[in-house]
Image (cartoon, rainbow, N blue to C red):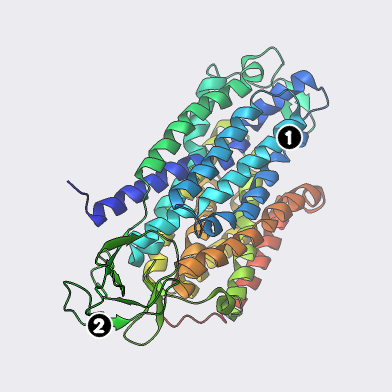
Amino acid sequence: MALSEYTKGILCVLGGVSIHLFLGCLYLYGNIQVYITSYFHIYDDSISLNTTLIIGPILTTMQGIAIFIGPILMKYMNPRLVIVIGLSICLGSIFAATFTTNFIVFAILFALFGIGIGIAYLVPLLLAWEFFPQRKGLLSGIIVGAFGFGAFFFGFISLAIVNPSNESPTIHTEGGDIFDKDSKPARDALKMLRTNCAIWLGLSLLGVLLINKKRRKLKVLSSKDDSQPIENNLNTDPLLKSKEGQVQGTKNVDSNPIELYQSSSEGTEKYIDEYEGYYEEDSSGKQTDSFASTVYVPFKTAIRDYRSYIIFIVAPLSLLQGTLVSFIFKNYGLENINDDAFITTVGTIGSVMNGISRGFWGVLIDKFPYKYVFGSLMIIQIIIGFTISQIVEYKALYLIWIGISFFCLGGHFSITPTIFAKLFGAKTGSKMYSLCFFLMIPPGIIALVLSKTLYKSIGYGKIFYITAGVTCVGLFLLLFFKQNR
């Protein structure tokens, strides 16, 4: 029995969740860095935590560069194949990296992991939006939320594999302590990655099997009567020309499969699987993208829209503080709260909040204007930035402040792609988000530089004053954003 489009859509979302659980392991490196460093320290005494810290920025930079590739490839090939290419690069590069004893080679291969993530990242979102065009924010939150949970789940799995007896690092290096070369965590670090690869392969296969593209049926007209579709007497609205000819079609307000009809002398049925090419006009005459049932705007028009530049500026400015929190919450907490186990718990809860928040903010952006949703997020961050130095000594309050910070951090990655899709349609929106995502890389680098250069002179508390001030600038710019719908 054939599955309904609704069921296929649900399976597509589940496939996207499975894929993003794997892709989200981009953030796993922060949890396993000490084990990777300990392994390479066996072969090179100069390797320290400061040396291996570079992998994190490399991964996010490569992801930002490659995030343009997925939507482009979707023009020329099946979206499932695009995902397979991205996942294959991810798995192949990590697996190959587990057989080297040279850290430079390892870093290069991990850079390929970031490229694979970038290629596959947006494709599940675009396919899910096609099935449920009125729930873009919710779907962004669910799928990208899985991205946020990837490192959380695999952090525990990695720990159970590489350090089941909970050994403590004993060798001091620049940047922190690492494990002795004869310890299990040092010897089994890359074995841990190989084991994870087997699990990631399972998640990838599951995701590829579940993911699918909404198919659109083409009923070809006979040459005798090409004014109406065969077996269809409904009133039709004119569609713009496709690449192959003049197309006519009907609208379905219940979001069932949209049937597209093409004039031809043949009497056959076809199915459209291409990513782009068919657009219709709504009742007001606006051109709409049948891929996502939203207003369609050409890329050249979108890139000239002043609102794009407001988002391009506001999103990175707002992201700076959340990124800083993710880098320094542990060190800042330990300076004032002498309880390593508690600070570790704070980080765990922060990871959970990061994942949960994406669905929450996604639902809000579906229901309320971008200015109000993102403005609320920024106001919360400003309050956190200006007050965290006053509450850092109190465990309960520090836990709440850091949890809320991660909750806001996750919101950036569900709100931003959704607003671009709402403004410009799924196809153009994905391109605009790719540009914005690339611009969201520098805040991570700036946060890292701030934490290393200003810490000794002004301390973490005053650094938060700076990031809160930067967020205030972004909030001011947001006031000029106008959204008509």
Of residues 371 and 211, the one nearer the viewer is: 211
Find residue 441 and report its image quarter. Answer: bottom right
Image location of residue 436, percent across then percent down: 60, 64
Q: Residue at x 78, y 53 (%)?
A: 458
Residue 175 appears anywhere in the view: no
Of residues 29 and 197, the one nearer the viewer is: 197
Of residues 470 and 207, the one nearer the viewer is: 207
Would you name the residue on which mark 1 appears?
52
Would you name the residue on which mark 2 appears?
227
What quarter of the picture does the C terminus occupy?
Answer: bottom left
**Which amino acid, by three-letter code, is at mark 2?**
Ser
322 w.r.t. 349: above or below: below
Image location of residue 446, percent across then percent down: 73, 55
Describe residue 477's horizontal placement relative to residue 248 as left or right: right
Disc 1 crowd rating (10 Å Cα; few below 14, some 14-19, many 20+) is some
Image location of residue 304, percent across then percent down: 61, 80
Look at the numbered disc 2 and give the secondary structure of its residue.
loop
Q: Residue at x 55, y 34 (%)?
A: 91
C-alpha distance separating marks 2 and 1: 67 Å
Of residues 356 and 141, the one nearer the viewer is: 141
